[in-house]
Image (cartoon, grey):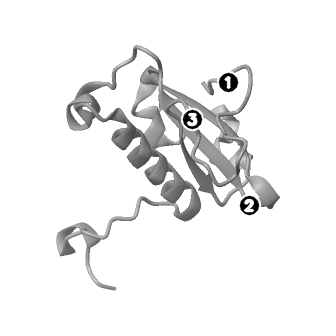
Amino acid sequence: MLARRTGARPVHPRPDARPTDGWEVVTVNRPPNEVLPGGRWPEPLRQLGRAIQVDSWPAPAGRGTELAARLRPGATLPGLAAHLAGDHPDRVIRAALRQAKQLTETGEVLRADRSPIDRGPAG
């Protein structure tokens, strides 16, 4: 289910510049086969379905994998994501990329605001 684009990667010629044309990018400290095992997107990105495009490539200097996503032209986010995004779907995509990064690197999505009930018993 990995969507591959033809042409250049969504990066600017200057390494310190942000990608252009709507791509949001995170660097995941894992090799590509762990970021997209079997070509499957991480769960936070799968929840956005066919509304987004996903791409990846090795990060510079062997520092893991760069994972990129953007809203497909003319697409809208599904369900609650569309409601939460409003006029800013890039916020939802950035959040999904951050969650995918955390899930891949740590095995869970980290939340600073978890209540004692969410955390379970102290052990």
**In the drawing, does residue 58 fall left or right of residue 92?**
right
* Gap between marks 3 and 2 measured at Cα: 22 Å
Mark 1, residue position: 4
Residue 102 in picture, x, y percent from top left: 49, 59
Amino acid beneath label 2:
Arg
Q: Residue at x 53, y 29 (%)?
A: 21
CB atoms at circles 1 and 2 under 8 Å apart?
A: no
Please give left or right for residue 25 compared with residue 80 in the image: right
- Rounded to the nearest whole Å, what is the CA distance between mark 1 and mark 2? 22 Å
Which residue has dot 2 on it? Answer: 63
For the residue marked with disc 1, what is the amino acid? Arg
- Of label 1 and label 3, which has the lower sequence position? 1
**Which residue occupies 30% across, 35% down?**
88
Residue in the image at 70% along x and 33% along y: 9
- Please, which residue is most extreme toward the right here? 61
First-in-chain label (3 vs 2) = 3
Q: Amino acid at mark 3?
A: Thr
- As drawn, 44 above or below 110: above
Horizontal and vertical percent for residue 33? 73, 45
Q: Quadrant of the N terminus?
A: top right
Look at mark 3 in the image and give the residue it sits on.
20
Q: Residue at x 24, y 68 (%)?
A: 113
Q: Secondary structure at mark 1?
A: loop
Marks 1 and 2, the one that precedes in the sequence: 1
Confirm or deny contact between disc 3 and disc 2 (CB under 8 A).
no
Separation (CA) of disc 1 from disc 3? 17 Å
Mark 3 crowd level (few <14, some 14–19, many ≥20, 10 Å Cα): few
User: Quick one: quadrant of the C terminus?
Assistant: bottom left
Using the image as rendered, state which of residue 106 and residue 50 is in the foreground: 50
